[in-house]
Amino acid sequence: MEYLPPYFFGIAAFIFGLLIGSFLNVVIYRLPLGESIVLPASHCPACDAAISWYDNIPVVSYAILRARCRSCRARISPIYPAVELLVACLYVLLFIIHRDQISTGSWLPLLADIVFVSLIVPLVFIDLRYKLLPNAITYPGLALLLMLRALAPDPWILAHTPNLFGLGGAPIWARSFFGSLLGAAIGGGSLWLVREVYYRLRHVEGMGLGDVKMMLMVGAFLGWQLTLLTIFIGSLLGSLIGIFLILLRGGSMKMQIPFGVFLGPAAIIALLVGQPLIVWYVGMYR
Ligand SMILES: [Zn+2]
């Protein structure tokens, strides 16, 4: 790859991100409605007119059409280009983080991270829109991420997995898989515990099982340390934005805020900067 300049791959990652982001928009829009994500081809949700390929180019078409459908002039939600740009930027960041590994020919860790953010982004936007975290994403997501952790062992997870059941001598994939299972147990377990305590105290469901399943998935990929960091950042974000909304709208503390909307960004923050953050934090107490 020495014959191609690094920015070539950066641009490729951006364009690939735009295309996957465009597909994730279809998932976000159709999955909760029980529609197929493959067929029919894109159509305007207002007038049902088919959208031609040249009106379906990520971000570009939105700008050219000035956010309106060509047939009925209905407004197109800015969420569509926002998701495309967000995914594209995340792919570029991941590419930059993994560039040293890539130069040694190791593409799997980058691919694994790309799969992870591509599962998290639709969960966040579906939760925001429908207050729902579909099993159709969390179940296969959990299986896929457990498998990826066995295939692409993460040095950080390996280094922080306790040597239980004499696993120290086990092959690297088995130790990584165990670290992944432990992360899932801690992630899903903590949220399940919070849910139970809340239910016993208030006798209403404060949190859906979807959040528990989402954190099983996040835990399987990030390992137990970054998973606890995710829950911490997610709770912090949720509280800050919750307080802000209450002040703004004068709502009550009972106002329902979907937790997945905060856990998702928190998981991505933990993925991108969690390791240096934990090293810095632990270092303060040395
Ligand atoms: Zn239309």
Image (cartoon, rainbow, N blue to C red):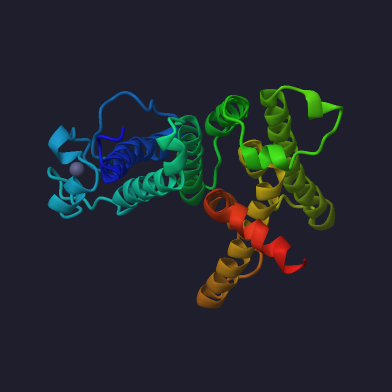
Q: Residue 222: x percent and y percent?
A: 62, 42
**Which residue is pictured at 38% across the width and 45% down the height?**
87
Residue placed furthest toward the front: 2
Q: Is residue 235 above or below residue 5?
A: below
- Report whether 142 appears left or right of 7: right
Which of 221/126 is in front? 221
**Which residue is pictured at 61% across the width and 36% down the height?**
154
- In the picture, which quadrant includes the N terminus? top left
Q: In this view, does 16 lie above or below 236?
A: above
- In the picture, which quadrant includes the C terminus? bottom right
Residue 85 visible in the shown view? yes
**Which residue is pictured at 23% across the width and 39% down the height?**
44
- Report whether 127 appears left or right of 197: left
Which of 99/17 is in front? 99
Q: In this view, does 277 lie above or below 9?
A: below
Q: Residue 243: x percent and y percent?
A: 60, 72
Q: Residue 205: x percent and y percent?
A: 72, 49
Q: Residue 188: x percent and y percent?
A: 71, 41
- Image quadrant of residue 33? top left
- Report whether 233 appears left or right of 104: right
- Report whether 160 appears left or right of 77: right
Q: How many labels does the image show?
A: 0
Residue 65 visible in the shown view? no
For ligand 1, the image quadrant comes to: top left
Residue placed furthest toward the right: 165
**Which residue is pictured at 70% across the width and 48% down the height?**
225
